[in-house]
Amino acid sequence: MSLRLHIFGAARTVTGSCFLLETDAARILVDCGMFQGSKEERELNYQHLPFRAAGIDALCLTHAHIDHSGLVPKLVKAGFDGPIYATDGTANLASIMLPDSGYIQEMEVDQLNRRNSRRGRETVSPIYTEDDAIASLRQFRSVPYGRWQDVALGFRARYWNAGHLLGSASVEIEVTSGENDKRTRLLFSGDLGPDHKLLQPDPDGPRDLDYVVLESTYGDTDRAGTTIERRRRMLRDEVRAAMRPSGVLLIPSFAVERTQELLVDLMELMEAGELPDIPIFIDSPLASKASAIFKRHAGELRNGSDLVQALESRWVRFTESVEQSKAIDRIHSFHIIIAASGMCEAGRIRHHLKAWLWKDEATVLFVGFQAQGTLGRILQDGASKVRIHGEEIKVRARMRTLDLYSGHADGPELKTWLSERLPVRRGVFLVHGEDPALKALQSALADLERVPDALIPEIDDVYDLSGEQPARVERHEARLPGSSAGHRDWHNDYAELLLDINDAVEAAADKKAKGVIIRRIRDALKSGSRG
């Protein structure tokens, strides 16, 4: 049987999840996600898909997060007309998240094109529009957990709760060849939830597999001793430390699930008297729509009644319009703003950061993973200045991290999950992680019995899975070299250089000293161009 695995994303980086399984009879995708992170990675979203969309028979989605589903409208627009299999929860969330993604792209490209016109540069088009996203929703087909579903000739899939997000799944794929009905069983973990999730169950999955494709976002992290109670105590302490008479606590947060978990914890702390009553603004139209979906699914969620109660609290306000969002910044008493995006790459959080970063009354609390090259990661790493919407902003606000709200399992939890899937006979691929996490998890898995040594693929790698172990197939040059994936790129370095130049010129003692600095920079540029 001919069976190949193409790895088109989430290789040596945490976004852009996309895997293609191919036999002589059919081709299916598992996930079709958008790249986030550095500008070099995000530019991949604008390139042609690395496969022929019309040649794909079916798509299996693990969950609705944009780094797993965000290029679905582009796939459909490029000619894919097959079914998109997803759980009911994933289909419901995708119905709001994909149109929102298209709308954001239209708005951002419109702003970019206005700047390009002023600079004499060519205009660009969005990856897809809101209408494109809405059109793609017609191809979704809901599937239940635990039931086999025929998805293409020789392929069937079964979905297992991954405990990561409403509707999230690990996708088991069984491939049957025409010769002797030889079967190969693969499991794509998707994103796996941690043990201490408030709303989701523990992840589940089958045993006795040929291959596992395993996420490794937090493969180098051990959150030993974490409980919901400990997390709430730490959140309480962060809020108390942030409280200033005219201050704000800004929490960049994914609009779907993390925002809802934070809200429950904050309201529980206020109800218990651990925190005073504080106005909480959920400044995200997407979070508002997602919360309505969570309320409809409350009966399926752990602590679903607590979520409903929190969403209906008089201290919680959802803002819809841009005018309402801007009005929040005129409040003169302490308040909390939870706004997307979680990595500060788009959305209303950037406007709030621009308004508050330069004020020492502000605190920014990061509650999730910040990919390399994102504004969130740059701030988290201690930048003294950043550029937002083309403007230089001094950072005086406090930067804090409470990384206990992640929807991802840590290293020991990933190892435990894999040990419960054994035996895995032929291969394990580690994906959806940056280099330190990948290598730490690879090392941790080495002592597991009945599992081969884990492989760390690179983007656009192709593996032949028809033998007793995976064999890497020669391929064309990758769209993103492994040395670039999951790292800062030249755009980050360029922005930092501009800030450093400004600092140096401003610090110069007089006009003559400023002129010397500028002349030396020009000489260096001329020397570099000659070299």
Image (spheres, helix red, strand yellow):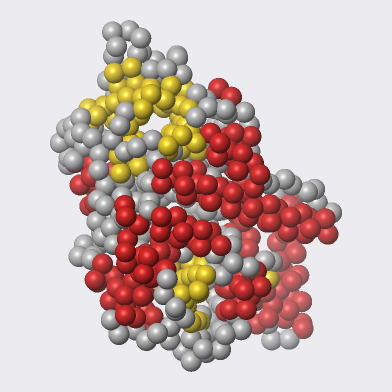
Q: What residue appears at the point 62 percent right and 74 percent down from the top-left corner?
A: 324
Q: Is residue 9 above or below residue 329?
A: above
Q: Is residue 230 above or below residue 344?
A: below
Residue 35 visible, this orientation: no
For the residue pair 460 and 439, the one nearer the viewer reads as: 460
Q: Is residue 422 above or below residue 223?
A: above
Classify residue 159 as left or right of residue 417.
Answer: right
Q: Position of residue 144 (x, y in %)?
A: 34, 37
Tally the marks: 0
Q: What residue appears at the point 83 percent right and 59 percent down from the top-left corner?
A: 118
For the residue pair 440 and 248, the one nearer the viewer reads as: 248
Q: Residue furthest top?
A: 179
Q: Position of residue 495 (x, y in %)?
A: 63, 63
Classify residue 279 as left or right of residue 227.
Answer: right
For the residue pair 476 and 212, the one nearer the viewer reads as: 212
Dividing the picture into quarters, in which one does residue 365 lie? bottom left
Q: What residue appears at the point 77 percent right and 82 percent down from the top-left corner?
A: 512
Q: Residue furthest bottom?
A: 245
Q: Position of residue 225 (x, y in %)?
A: 20, 65
Quarter of the picture containing the N terminus is top left
Q: Position of residue 299 (x, y in %)?
A: 32, 55
Residue 51 visible, this orientation: yes
Q: What residue appears at the point 73 percent right and 59 percent down from the top-left corner?
A: 111
